[in-house]
Image (tube, helix red, strand yellow):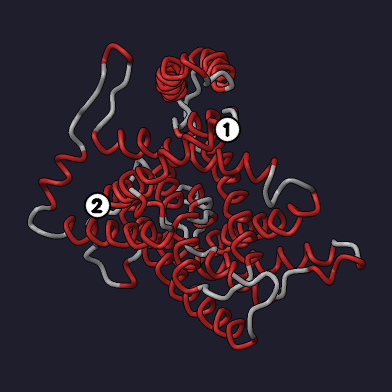
Amino acid sequence: MTLFRSERVAAVLLVVAAALGVALANSPVGPALFTARDAHLGIPWLGLELSAGHWITDGLLAVFFFLAATELRHELTHGELDSARKALVPAVAAIGGVLAPALVYLGFVRDPALVNGWPIPTATDIAFALGVLALLGRGLPSRVRALLLALAVIDDLIAILLIAFLFTSELNPIPLLTAVPVVLLFGFLSYRVRGRRAPWIVAALIVLGAAAWTLVHLSGIHPTIAGVALGLIMAPAVAGKARHTLEPWSNGLVLPLFAFVSALVIIPSVGISGLSPVFWGIMVALPVGKLVGITAGAIIASRLVPKAQRAMAVPVGDVLVVATLGGIGFTVSLLMNELAFRADGSIIAQGTLAVLIGSIIGAIIGAVVTGLRARSYRRAGPGPETS
C-alpha cells in the first residue's frame, strides 16, 4: 500500500484511468459499460435510489473530500494557513484563481441556460497538481509545495461551498437538521478513541459517518459535503490515523475509479465549429484563467504585505509554477460539470472532454514551467529551503 501514498503514482493513475474511460466508452464495449454505470443499486428502505455510477461520484468521492477536509484542518491549525499572514498570499491567489476562470468561461458562454457552468474551471486537483510537482520539481524550495498545497486546499474549500450553495436544487431541511447532531456525536466520539474501547468507538464512527452521508444525501445537498463536515470536526490525532489508513485507498481506488466513470463519454461526432461554447469556455478557462488569476492574486497579495516583510515574498518564478499547476482541474471540475449540466447529457460529454483537455494542457504547461524553474534552482545550488 505504500506505493499508493506517492503523489507521483496518484497523478499517473488519474491520467491512465481517465484515458481508459474515454477509450473504452468509444469502443465496442462502450454500451456495456454505460449499462453497468447506470445499473440501479438502490437501498429502498433507506430512501437511497442510486445508480452504480452515483455510488461512485456521490459515495466513494466523499472519502476524498473527507481527506481534503482533514488536510484543511491541519493547515488551519498547524500548517501553512495557521495565521493571517501565512494565509494571505494563498488565499488571495486562490480567489483570483476562481474569479479569472469564471470570467473567461462567461466570456465564451452567453446562453442563460448554460452560464451555471462557470464554477467548473475554478477547481484545482490537489492530487494531480502535487503529483506533477513531485515528478519534476526536484530542487525547488519547499515553499513552492507549501504554497501549492495551501492554495489547492483553499481552492477545494471554495469548491465545496460552491457545490453546497449552487448545486442544491431541492432542500429537505429535516434530514439536514438531523445530520447535525450525528456529525457532532461523530466529533465527540473521535476524541475518545483510546484504550480497550477504541475498536468499538471506531466501529461507531464508521456507522455515524455512513448515517451522516445518508442524511445529507436525503436533504438534497450533494453528500460529499458530509465528508467535509466529518473531516473538519474529527479529533486531529484520530484524523491523522484515518488519513494514513485511507490515503492509499483514495489514491489507488477512489480517485481513479471516479476519473474512469466520469470519463465515460462519447466523443461528439461534430466538427470544431459544432462544439458548444461550454467546451471552449472550460478548455480555455482552466489553463489560461487559472494562470492569470493565481498570478495576479499572488502579486496583489504581496503588495498588501508590510514592506518590512516583502523580502520574504515568493518570487514570481515560483508563483508561475503554482499558477500553471493550478490549471489542472480534473477531479472536482469533473464533479461540478456533472452537477451543473445533469439534465443535458450532450453538454456533460463536451464539458467532460473540455475538463480533460484543459487539464492536460494545464499539466503540460505546468510540467514545462516546473521543470525549467527546478533546473534553474539546481544550477544555482542548494539553498536553505531547497528540497
Q: Residue at x 40, y 39 (%)?
A: 246
Judge whether residue 375 can be spotted in this image. yes
Q: Where is residue 73 shown, x and y percent of the image?
A: 62, 39
Residue at image mark 2: 264
Q: Marks 2 and 1, Cα distance to the nearest angstrom?
A: 38 Å
The one of 15 and 193 positioned closer to us in this rendering: 193
Classify residue 317 as left or right of residue 353. Answer: right
Q: Earlier in the sequence, mark 2 or mark 1?
A: 1
Classify residue 265 as left or right of residue 120. Answer: left
Secondary element under disc 1, as helix, strand or loop, is helix
Judge whether residue 176 can be spotted in this image. no
Q: Where is residue 203 shown, x and y percent of the image?
A: 40, 18
Q: Quadrant of residue 278?
A: bottom left
Q: Residue at x 54, y 63 (%)?
A: 326
Q: Is residue 167 above or below residue 22?
A: above
Secondary element under disc 2, as helix, strand or loop, is loop
Check the image and name the residue furthest to the front.
195
Please state, as top left, top right, bottom left or bottom right, where the C terminus lies in the image: bottom right
Q: Quadrant of residue 49?
A: top left
Residue at image mark 1: 237
Q: Where is residue 247 shown, x and y percent of the image?
A: 42, 44
Q: Is residue 158 above or below residue 28?
A: above
Give, as a three-letter code, the residue at label 1: Ala
The one of 190 and 163 positioned closer to us in this rendering: 190
Q: How many marks?
A: 2
Say few, some or many: other residues with alpha carbon within 10 Å of mark 2 (under 14 / 14 to 19 / 20 or more). Answer: many
Q: Where is residue 224 shown, x and y percent of the image?
A: 45, 34
Give, as a three-letter code, the residue at label 2: Leu
Q: Residue at x 55, y 15 (%)?
A: 185
The one of 182 and 351 positioned closer to us in this rendering: 182
Say few, some or many: other residues with alpha carbon within 10 Å of mark 1 (under 14 / 14 to 19 / 20 or more). Answer: few
Q: Is residue 241 above or below residue 283?
A: above
